[in-house]
Amino acid sequence: MDNDLLKTASPIEFALSDVPDDLFRRASFDEDEAEALSPHVSYWSDVWRRFFENKSAVVFLTVFIIILLGCYIIPLVSPLPITGIIDDSINAKMSSSHWLGADKFGHDFFTKMWKGGQISFMVGFVSAILQTIIGVIIGAVSAYAGGRVDSVIMSIVNVLIAIPYLVIVLAIRVVAGAGTATIIFALVITGWLNVARLTRGQILQLKTEEYVTAAKSMGVGARTILARHLIPNTLGVILVAFTLAIPQAMFSEAFLSFIGLGTNAVSWGSLIRAGMDVRFKHPQQLIAPSILLALTMLCVQLIGDTLRDALDPKLRR
């Protein structure tokens, strides 16, 4: 080696200077092989993978889908009417024609029970969707605006949360009257509050992130920042809140119908109330809709809990 090179060479380079070149082989790098060994997995793909790895969640999801489909298919294919008064079948006992007997109007209770699930599902899903949308918008605006706007909105939220929801439902029912739309409206008015608080907490954490600061420095408007950067990053919390709001709304509708403040249409709550009147003569008319309501709420609750765990970034591989 040259004397100048020996002076500037590191100890490792100096030690390797006497090793023949034929002992070295340049390492190859295959991008396709590296991609195959460690494939890129998106966030949502990883979420659904972890969700479906939970066998109990898959079972409850299957049961929920079966109940949902049954509520819409069985009333369509059943040959027994559930409207009007059928004198020949009034309070009929369980038989091959009436699996769960008939009610005081002569309606086949098995068919009517599945028909009642349509109202319960509609109230649950529609009210959950509306309260989630309203809560996300108000919570996001409150957190992003901050200052006096945030204080005013949160003061209103805290006041409404302090009022028992039954008082609000009674007030709305007195003004608007009975009906499915009234129940949905009452549940939305009282249900968006928790969603707004959850969304506000998430936005307060995210609005100080660097990508938000960069968007502001580029002149991006507040509406665009909320719609494209902040709200999409809170979808995990929003999705879990929506999932858990469904059984809460279904139970609230059933409870209000049971105490006589619910909808005039046939629902699981109204059937349970009617079943109380014949609980000794026809106990199945009380037990069957109660089981369907409880099983549906249990399925949705466990699906929401599993989804919450799957959305936890700490558990991502």
Image (cartoon, helix red, strand yellow):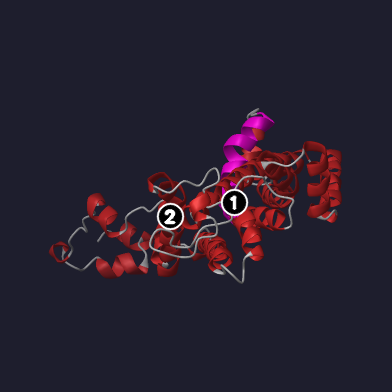
What residue sits right under mark 1 in the picture? 267
The location of residue 297, given as percent across then percent down, is 56, 61
- Which residue in the rendered view is the most extreme toward the front? 88
Q: CA distance from mark 1 to mark 2?
A: 18 Å
> Which residue corresponds to the image point at 62% horizontal and 65% vertical from the top-left?
278
Q: Residue at x 13, y 63 (%)?
A: 22
Q: Is residue 107 visible?
A: no
Q: Which region shows up in magenta?
A: 221-246
260 sits left or right of 285 in the view: right
Instruction: Give the answer, above or below, for where 29 lies relative to 286.
Output: above
Secondary element at tag 1: loop
> Is 243 colored magenta in this rendering?
yes
Above or below for 60 versus 213: below
Q: Which amino acid type corresponds to the residue marked 2 in the rendered image?
A: Ile
| Mark sitting earlier along the chain (1/2) | 2
Q: Of residues 282 and 168, which is closer to you in this image?
A: 282
Q: Secondary structure at mark 2?
A: helix
Pointer 2 residue: 65
Q: Do the CB atoms of the residues marked 1 and 2 lie less than 8 Å apart? A: no
Q: Nearer the viewer, residue 39 or 266?
A: 266
